[in-house]
């Protein structure tokens, strides 16, 4: 199996198979990351599409040595989301209500999962923005520590500390809720 | 101690994300197992819940198809390299224009002006546009021409949508956006806008008129540009929105992207000349 570096190099040379491979590998994570941040399936699809079109447009300028490919792609996604959220005027609480989960057809299962995801998102809102961003990139996008650090422009040590403190804070929130 | 815990926690999370069980990692750190286990369970829960979010498979396939069309278009049109001898390219374009007219005849150039991206004469249309941009001397003239070309791209998008050829829409949208970026750039920086694919190069030496009356001539040009943008933007957006109303479901997704990007780019270009946002 070719390394990601060689796939990226072929994609830079406009090899459509290589680009399709990168797309396949990163699409779900990018979509999930955007969906949880914007809370609307249609908008998440549009933004995901834009991320890949922008990536295609800019891939000629991508340099492997300066940043891993997934971190580069997530930077594009993050900027798209920031740009989108800046323009959006709707309230976050409204958005949370719109969030739905699409992995099942059984309405009971879908409703249960929706509630779980909503609860999780409501709890994530209680974290600091930096902690929340690390949680999104680490547990939702599943990026390695080094790539989260590159995406956010922070040191690996800082990301480890943010990750640890965020989970400790979430654990306290969950524990408090269980005892209420 | 805390730093050590952060490190171990980070390692266990990495292993968990690669499919290992929490217990398997905790076995390697028995002294910290009690403290780490509930935290790893929280991490596992977040990851598990997020993994259940999936996009519609048909959407994923549709975007891939659009991207592959865009990659194919890129293969046909390799990325232009910026070089120090940009001026040589301008002369080459001018020469090409003369050759195009001589070899194909003025009639061909005229016929190309109505061609669409999937037609043989479309490259002639684009070449003609590049030549016109080359001969537009001032930055404001170029910006006005870019405004007209952006509207032309919008009309092409609407027509391609009407014909159900959604594959061409993303690339046309990118072209439209690029035209408007150059408009914004011209207004915002007052630097020279150059031809598509090249970087803008600041004017090294201002003209005597600019030194004597800076901004006066430019101010009038920018007002004219503002008027042009004010007329062109609603025409383009209305054409796209009308196309959206009549489009098939498959074409609607591509058009939605085109409308959003066009609106954003027009807003940015107009904000440079006027603070008011576009009417919805």
Image (tube, coloured by chain):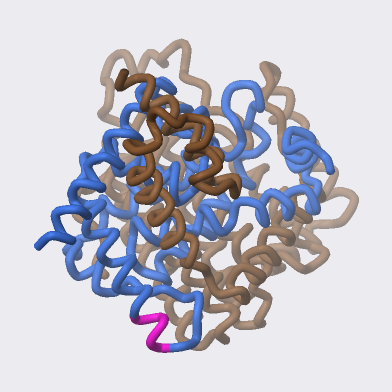
Magenta-span inclusion, residue A177: no
Q: Which chain is brown?
A: B
- As displayed, is residue A133 above or below residue A26? above
Q: Position of residue A164 (x, y in %)?
A: 33, 34
Q: Is residue B40 visible?
A: yes
Q: Residue at x 39, y 56 (%)?
A: B45
Magenta: main secondary structure equals: helix
Q: Residue at x 60, y 61 (%)?
A: B170
- Quadrant in which the N terminus of chain A appears: top right
Q: Position of residue B210 (x, y in %)?
A: 34, 19
Displayed quadrant of residue B259: bottom left
User: Left or right of A119: which side holds B98?
Assistant: right
Front residue of B162/B30: it is B30
Give, as a single range, the part of the protein colored magenta. Answer: A107-111
- As displayed, is residue B27 above or below residue A80? above
The furthest residue to the right: B103
Q: Which chain is blue?
A: A
Displayed quadrant of residue B56: bottom right
Q: Residue at x 73, y 23 (%)?
A: B88
Q: Is residue B138 visible?
A: no
The furthest residue to the top: B205
Q: Position of residue B161 (x, y in %)?
A: 60, 77
User: Left or right of B118: which side holds B134?
Assistant: left
Q: Residue at x 38, y 55 (%)?
A: B46
- As displayed, is residue A94 above or below residue B151? below
């Amino acid at each position: 199996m070719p390394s990601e570096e060689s796939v990226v190099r072929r994609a830079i040379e406009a090899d459509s198979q290589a680009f399709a491979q990168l797309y396949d590998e990163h699409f779900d994570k990018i979509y999930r990351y955007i969906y949880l941040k914007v809370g609307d399936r249609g908008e998440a699809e549009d933004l995901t599409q834009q991320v890949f079109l922008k990536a295609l447009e800019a891939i000629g300028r991508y340099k492997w040595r300066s940043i891993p490919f997934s971190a580069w792609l997530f930077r594009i996604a993050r900027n798209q989301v920031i740009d989108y959220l800046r323009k959006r005027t709707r309230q976050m609480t409204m958005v949370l209500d719109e969030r739905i989960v699409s992995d099942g057809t059984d309405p009971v299962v879908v409703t249960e999962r929706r509630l779980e995801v909503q609860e999780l998102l409501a709890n994530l809102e209680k974290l600091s923005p930096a902690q929340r961003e690390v949680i999104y990139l680490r547990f939702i996008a599943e990026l390695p520590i080094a790539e989260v650090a590159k995406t956010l422009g922070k040191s690996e040590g800082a990301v480890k500390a943010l990750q640890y403190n965020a989970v400790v804070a979430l654990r306290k929130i969950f524990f408090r809720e269980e005892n209420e | 101690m805390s730093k050590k815990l952060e490190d171990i926690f980070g390692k266990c999370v990495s292993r968990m994300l690669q499919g290992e069980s929490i217990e398997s990692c905790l076995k390697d750190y028995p002294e910290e197992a009690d403290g780490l286990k509930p935290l790893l369970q929280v991490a596992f829960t977040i990851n598990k819940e997020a993994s259940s979010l999936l996009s519609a498979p048909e959407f994923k396939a549709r975007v891939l198809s659009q991207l592959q069309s865009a990659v194919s278009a890129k293969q046909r049109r390799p990325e232009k390299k910026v070089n120090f001898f940009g001026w040589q390219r301008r002369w080459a374009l001018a020469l090409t224009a003369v050759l195009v007219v001589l070899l194909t005849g003025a009639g061909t150039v005229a016929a190309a002006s109505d061609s669409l991206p999937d037609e043989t004469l479309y490259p002639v249309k684009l070449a003609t546009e590049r030549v016109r941009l080359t001969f537009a001397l001032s930055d404001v003239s170029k910006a006005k021409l870019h405004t007209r070309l952006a509207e032309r791209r919008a009309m092409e998008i609407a027509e391609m949508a009407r014909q159900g050829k959604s594959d061409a829409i993303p690339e046309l949208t990118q072209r439209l956006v690029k035209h408007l970026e150059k408009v914004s750039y011209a207004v915002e920086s007052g630097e020279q806008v150059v031809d598509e694919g090249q970087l803008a190069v600041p004017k090294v030496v201002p003209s005597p008129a600019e030194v004597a009356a800076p901004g006066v001539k430019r101010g009038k040009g920018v007002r004219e540009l503002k008027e042009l943008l004010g007329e062109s933007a609603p025409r383009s957006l209305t054409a796209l929105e009308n196309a959206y109303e009549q489009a098939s479901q498959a074409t609607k997704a591509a058009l939605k992207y085109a409308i959003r990007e066009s609106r954003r780019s027009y807003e940015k270009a107009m904000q440079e000349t006027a603070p008011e946002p576009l009417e919805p």
